[in-house]
Image (spheres, coloured by chain):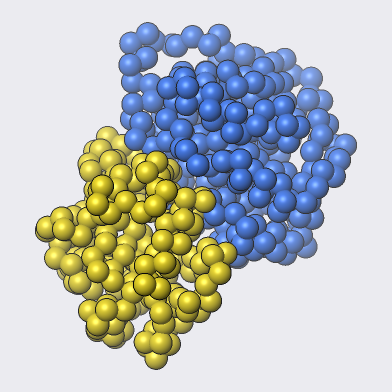
Amino acid sequence: MKIVIIDYGAGNTANVKNAFEKLGAAVTISSSEAVWKNADALVLPGVGVFGAAMKRLNGKCDAIVKLISDGKPFLGICLGMQLLLEKSEESDGVQGLGVLVGEVKKFRGKLPVPQIGWNKVEFQKSSLPQGLKNFYGYFANSYYCEPKDNSWVAATTDYGVKFPSVFRQKNIFATQFHPEKSGELGLKFLKNFIREVKQ
Amino acid sequence: MLCKSMWSNTTSPIVRSDRTMDHKSDIRFVGLEISKISKRIIPCLDVKDARVVKGTNFNNLQDAGDAVALAKFYYQQGADELVFLDISASSELRKTAVELVRKVAKEIFIPFTIGGGIRTIEDIEQLLKAGADKVSINTAAIENPNLIKEAAKEFGSQAIVVAIDAKRIGSKWSVYAYGGKKETQLDAVSWAKKAEELGAGELLLTSIDCDGTKKGFDIELTNKVSRSVNVPVIASGGAGKKEDFLDVFQKTNATAVLAASLFHYRELSISELKKYLKENGVDIRES
């Protein structure tokens, strides 16, 4: 299993690499489109600001979108999930990858922002991965995805507003939480991802 | 940030809160604002040269083992996060801290914080790049509050924890720097607000009076600070039994608790503590 983490100078690639390596996968961190193309699965991590991330991906977006739409298994984590949408309140006027119709919104409520900590991830019955019924994910986010239609939403989490914490659509997976920091069950989630990629 | 009994040799009287609420009408608000997020149990490891040190007298350190092995043990027991406090923390030893972080990041898959002697943006960058999720800043933030602002801007608030060591003076609490050795002119509640305003994502609040006493957390201090800010407050200092943890979660807005010797000496296991808290209605992560 060759996992390639898309390197665009944004955030915590080391810990995503550590987690996949713990599960026995071979992991490369790369900014080369040729390397991305040869991957069994692509991972787009991300910590930081929507607009800055899109700027760093400048010139590479079409390649990523094409790989995804050609069926390359893909996992977006945190900001890597949000970038799949068209735009974000965080960065006015900046276009996202636009793989999914919708917008990224800011938490507006009485709860502290950013949301930092462990929160319950409630999977839809039909898309519950094995052993993740009582799953808490580790979150660190101020914004959340609001897709136009909910067909991709495999799990939701409540933080004043109920928001999608997992997307699942054919070859595309995305999580708002950090599976690489969500303990043994987080690793189990990644293991499920590897298993699905193999199939 | 103080994890262990640094204060056992001080002569100051221990000032305990009376464990009642200041205002009865406040009770209904306790815990509501942050109720969505589960409460965190955080063991703290004091490390020197990548080894865990423990002991009840800070100046009489006993080497208690491999930091990575102990971290892994706590991880497997269901700890929600870990904090490493590098008590050697001279610039020469910064390298060993980075190396420790790198090793820990390969073995545990929960967030962890490293603190101790962090003074510059470069220090922070090195530790985060090596795999730490957060850094804890104490004295450097007091001497240069702008460091909080710069660090939050550069790495995001979620990565910046400001540690506050507070000691009761009359009806207020003073902030102490240099591992509790130096009194500052800062009031703990005002400094907490200021740290939040500058961009701290969390506050690690240690009661110097309670630390090492095992008589429970300083409820009054924790209450005052956690109600004055909107960022998570980690209560530290004084944990002696599982009821103390329930107490601080029920009576204050702290969303996390930190303890060291209680866990190190196996007086209380994390899994046992989490089970007890859950049975008593605290939202605890299952692992």
**Up/down of B221 relative to B233, above or below:** above
Residue B29 appears in the picture as rendered: yes
State the hue of chain B.
blue
Q: Residue furthest bottom?
A: A34
Image quarter in which the N terminus of chain B is found:
top right
Corner quadrant of residue A22: bottom right
Q: Give me the residue at 47% from left, 19% from top.
A: B280
Residue B85 appears in the picture as rendered: no
Q: Is residue B252 left or right of residue A169?
A: right
Residue B6 screen position, x and y as percent: 76, 32
**Up/down of B72 relative to A193, above or below:** above
Q: Give me the residue at 69% from left, 33% from top.
A: B263
Q: Which chain is displayed in yellow in the rendered image?
A: A
Q: Residue furthest left?
A: A148
**Up/down of A141 relative to B183, above or below:** below
Q: Give me the residue at 39% from left, 37% from top.
A: B37
Q: Give me the residue at 47% from left, 50% from top.
A: A185
